[in-house]
Structure formats: structure tokens, C-alpha cells
Image: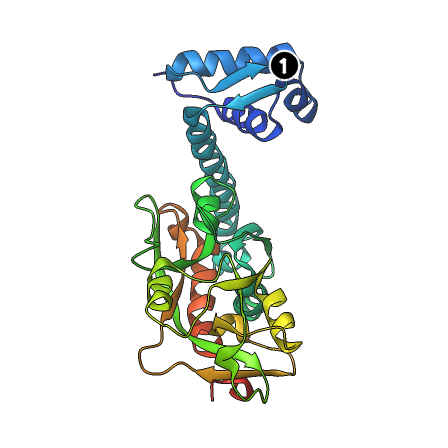
Amino acid sequence: MTDLAPHELRIIVTVADARGFSAAARELGMTQSAVSHSVRTSERRIGVLLFERGRRGATPTPAGDAVAGHARRVLRLLDVMGDEARGIAAGPGGADTVSGPLRIAAFRSAALHLLPPALERLTTRHPGIEPVVRMVRELGRGTAGEVLDGRADLAVVTIGTASPTPPELVGGVLLEEEYSLVHPAGHAAPRTLPLVDWAENCTSYTRDWWAAQAWIPRATVEAEDDGAVLSMVSRGLGMAIMPGLSLYGAPDGIQITALGSDRPTRSIGYVTTPEQARSLAVRALIRELRAERGSAAVSDSRKPE
């Protein structure tokens, strides 16, 4: 197979994102026929159909999705290569002058409570780095999927036997957080309250623990995220079982009660590609995230009682 040039990779990515040749052409400042010709040439070189053409545009085939993901990652590495080369050329201390965007995917509670202090230190030490954070629901392919698709350089993820690190990525655990019972403060019998839950809350391991607890009812209130769960509980609408990171800065009216020695836990970590793991910006962020692990627990005033 003949190698594809960066501009050909960029066209594939733009068509995949725009879901059409005409829209991609407008974004790239090209004619529609030039974009179409480039994609057909790429398909011929790779030997597979990348897009299904139709009245509503161009939809990536499964192979097209995979190729677009690889293309984004290659294009990103070219950007990183240039940024780091310029930093090295700056002479002694050039590594500290690394600049440009650092794309991070994180689920809500990590984006709210784990990332900000780490990014504050990162940008103080490396002012040229520009963090770009996207909040992604930790469902399906979740935040790790953003890295696999080339849309993020690093993702904060939940890691465990039910959600292992994808084999194409590398990563590590940052912290272990406990689940606790969360209920309206002062309630005499919180375990009798309705259960408030949200889809991202637990891995299957935690759900297995739940299934073994006869006192936990089926959720009667499904909230959009952990912030909505806390708001509902604080208003006396139910109780919830939540991980520590979601309880950081919990509102007034909330009481947090320990679940005992057999309580479930959740591992929070990071993943990135093997190539990005060697880049200066990603390595610097990982250092700050690891430094943050000790201070990401629930504050003293909100620890389980």
C-alpha cells in the first residue's frame, strides 16, 4: 500500500467529522470534486471502502471509522513533533517551553474535582501548554474511546476488571475511591428511602455488590449526572450510593455514611497512546495527576461517618 500524505489523512478526518463531501470541502477550502477524488484515491490505496455515499452525505464504514481514528492520531503526532522540536531547538530548558493544545477527555466528577488543581500546577510550570478539556460520559467506549479515536491525547477513566485498559492504550491507576451511602442529613431511617441513581455510577463489579444487598431497592429516580443526584438527595427525595469523587464539595443537607468493610470501590486512572505517553506535555500532565492523587479524596468535613 502506498503511504497516505498528511493532507490526504486530513481530508479523511474532515469528511468523517462533517459527514459529507460538500461540508468537508467548505471547511477545507477545496472543491467537492477534489475532496471526493482524494477519498477515492485513499480508498483504492488502502483497499477498503471508507464511506457509504448517500443522499444525506457520507457515513464512515466501520473501516472508515478505524482509519479516521488512526489518521487523527497521526496528524496529532505531527503537531506534537513540531512543538517539541521547537522546544528542543530553544536550547537548555527547551523542554519547559513546550507549547500548544493538550487535549483531555474526562467524565464529569473528574473534570470538576480531579483535573483543575493538576492543570493549575501544569500551566504554572509550563505556561505554553493550553489544556482543552472535554467532558464525556463514561458509558460505552467512554473517555478511553476519545483517545482511541484520536480526539484526546489523554483520558481520565474508570479502570477495573469490568472496564480494563484497551489493549491499544497504556495507562495507570491514580486513586481508589470508596462508595458511601448518601442521604438527607438527620434522616432517621435513610435505607428506607427511594434510590436515586445515574447511568455512569457503577461498574458491573459494583452492581454485583448492589445485587447482594437486600436493602437496596431498584432505582425509582434516574438522574442525568451525579450533581443532579446530590441535589435530589439534599432535597429529601431519596438516598444514593456514590463514589468519593462525586461527593467532593457535596451541598448542605447531605449526610455521608460508610457502607462497612465490604463496601465497593472504584479505580480512577488515565489512559493514553504509547506514542503520546512519550510526549513532553502528556508526561507532565501525568506527573501532576499522580501528585494530585493524595488530595482528591472527599474533604474532611464530608468524609463518611
The colour style of the image is: rainbow
Left or right for 280, reference 301: left
Amino acid type of disc 1?
A: Arg
Left or right for 292, reference 108: left
Left or right for 104, reference 266: right
* Residue 141 position in % (x across, y down): 44, 45
Q: Nearer the viewer, residue 168 or 87?
A: 168
Q: What SS does tag 1 mark?
A: loop
Is residue 70 placed above or below 42 in the rendered structure? below
Quadrant containing the N terminus in the rendered view: top left
Q: Nearer the viewer, residue 189 or 179?
A: 189
Q: Nearer the viewer, residue 15 or 253?
A: 253
Image quadrant assignment for residue 128: bottom right
Q: Residue at x 32, y 55 (%)?
A: 162
* Residue 293 position in % (x across, y down): 43, 73
Q: Which residue is mark 1?
A: 55
Q: Is residue 298 visible?
A: no
* Residue 229 position in % (x across, y down): 59, 67
